[in-house]
Amino acid sequence: MRLIKFPALIIVIGLLLSLSACSKTDKVIIYATARSGGWLWARPDPDAEKGEIGGYAVFKNVYNLEQKPKLAVDLGNWFNETPEGYLTKGQAAIDCMNAIPYAVSSLGIADLALAPKDLQKLVKTAAFPVIASNLYLKTGKKPEFIKSLQLLLLGKTKIGFLSVTVMDPDRPNTPKYLANYKFEKESYELQRSLKALKDAGADITALLLNINPKKPAGKGFYTAFFARLPRLDLIITDDPALKKPSRINKAWLVPVPSKMASAARIELSIDPAGGRLLKAGYKLLPLEKEKYGQDPETLKIVSRHREKILKHFSKRLGTAADDLNRSDKSPDSPLGGFTADCVRRWARTNGAIINNAILAGDIAKGAVTVGDLYRVLPYDTSVVFVKIRGEDLRRAIEETVSKDISVSGLQVRMKGQSVDSLLIEGTPLAANRIYRVAVPDSIVNDKDYTLLSSATEFANSHRFLREVIGWCFSRRRTALKPAGGRIIREQQ
C-alpha cells in the first residue's frame, strides 16, 4: 500500500508546485478609452440612478487608485460629439489627457476632419505619442507628426502598440480616401508594423483598432481578417458593435466604451519567464462621480475650458420662428433649405446646393445661440463659389439629385432619373449661360458629386458655413421655415 501511496503523493506535490508556479504571473493593467468626442466633464447618467457620470477628472481618480503597473491608452475621436469639442478642435481633450497622463493614442476617423496643419498643431501639444500605422497624406507620404508604432515598458514587459483604421469592414484591404488623407491596406501596414515591433524586442503586441462607426464590424469580420495575419496578443477596438471580449486567432479582443462615461480595465497576466501573455481580464468601469470623486488638478483644466466654452456658446444670434429639422414629413429638409437660402443670400449667387449629410442636428424653435450652430455644423466646412455652364449644371443636378440634397434658387422637376424641367431664379435654365452656384467644400471634395468636374471656375471663400448661418441670423434676427417643393420627383 505504501508503494502505491508514495507515487501518488509525489504526483500531488508536483501538481501543487506546478499550480504555484503558474500563479506567480506578472500583472499589469491597461486602461482604455475611446470616442470621447469632447465629453470633458461629468454629466447626469440617463440610464441609471448614479448621479453624474464620466469625465476626465473622475477617470484620473480611478487611474490613481490602481496599485498595479499601469498605463492608459485612447483610440481617438477627440471632438466630434459635443459643441465644446468642436470649438476647441480637440485641444480641450488633449489637455485633459495630458493630465492623466495617457501613454499612447491612436487617431479616430473624426479627428481627420482637421486639415494636416491643424492636426499637426494639435498632436504637438500631446504629451503622449499618437500612432496610425496605415494613415498617409494624399501625397503618399506619412505625416511626420504621426508614428506608425510605439514600444512601451510596463512593469518588466515591453508592449508594442500599433494602430490601423478600417473604413469598411465589408471591404478591407482597399485604399480609402478622405479630403486630406488616405488609408492604405490594413493587412500590409499591420504586418509591417508588427515585424518592426518584434525586431525592437516587444514581448507583447497590442493593436489599437479603429472601426468606422457608420459601418460596425460583425464577429465574422474579425475571424476572417485576423486569420490571415501573424498572431497578435491583444486587440483593443472602438467598434460600437462589439459588446463583450472574446478570442480571435489566439488574440484577446476587447471592446472600449465611448463618451468618457466608462473606461475599460484590461488586466494582463504575463509569464515572468518568457514575457508571454497568458490571459487578459476585462472589466467595464462606469466613471461614477459620487463613488470616485474628481481629481482637483484635472478638474481645474476641465473647468477652465468649460467656462470659456459656455461663455462663447451662450451668445444669442437670433430666433427660429419654427423648428428647423434636418428631415420632415415632406421630401424637403427644412434645415437644409434654410441653410441653402443663407448661403445663396450671403454669396450673392444664382443658386446654392447643400448636401444634407453635413447637418449634424436640428434647430429648435426659439432662441438660437452660437452653441446651436456648432452642434448643427460641427466641422469647419467652408463655402465654395462655382461657375458652371447651364448644360453642365443640368447634368450635375441629374447625377446629384438622387442623393440627399437641398437647393436654393433652383426648382427641379424630375421624371424618373431625368430632369424634366429646371428653373433657376424663376426662369428656365439656359444651356450656354454661365451660372454662379455656391456649395459647401464637402461637395467639392466628395467623389460622389460631379459638380466640380463640370465647373469652368471655382474658388474657396474661406468662410465657414457655420459663420454664414450666423450672419443670416444676425441680419434677420428671426428665421422662418423655408418653403418646400423645390425638388419634385415623379415616376415615369
Image (tube, rainbow, N blue to C red):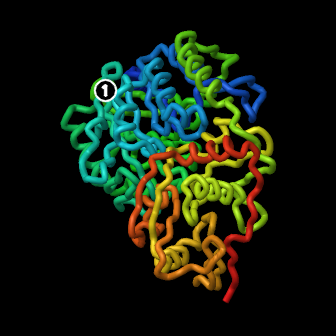
For this orientation, the residue located farthest to the top is 296
Which three-letter amino acid code belongs to the residue tagged 1?
A: Leu
For this orientation, the residue located farthest to the left is 199
Q: Name the residue under label 1.
A: 152
491 lies above or below 119: below
Q: Report the residue at 25% width, 37% height from top.
A: 197
407 lies above or below 112: below
Q: Is residue 134 left or right of residue 12?
A: left
Task: Determine the image quadrant of residue 202.
Answer: top left
Nearer-the-camera pick, 197 or 305 = 305
Q: Is mark 1 on a helix, strand or loop?
A: strand
Q: How crowded is mark 1: few (under 14 residues within 10 Å), some or many (20 or more)?
A: some
Give the image location of residue 350, x and y in percent.
56, 66
297 lies above or below 276: above
> Can residue 7 be spotted in the picture?
no
Quarter of the image with the N terminus in it: top left
Q: Report the residue at 38% width, 37% height from top.
A: 119
Task: Determine the image quadrant of residue 268.
Answer: top left
Give the image location of residue 90, x and y in percent.
48, 33
Q: Report the residue at 71% width, 24% height from top.
A: 52
Q: Report the residue at 70% width, 33% height from top.
A: 316
Give the image location of residue 127, x and y in percent.
37, 23
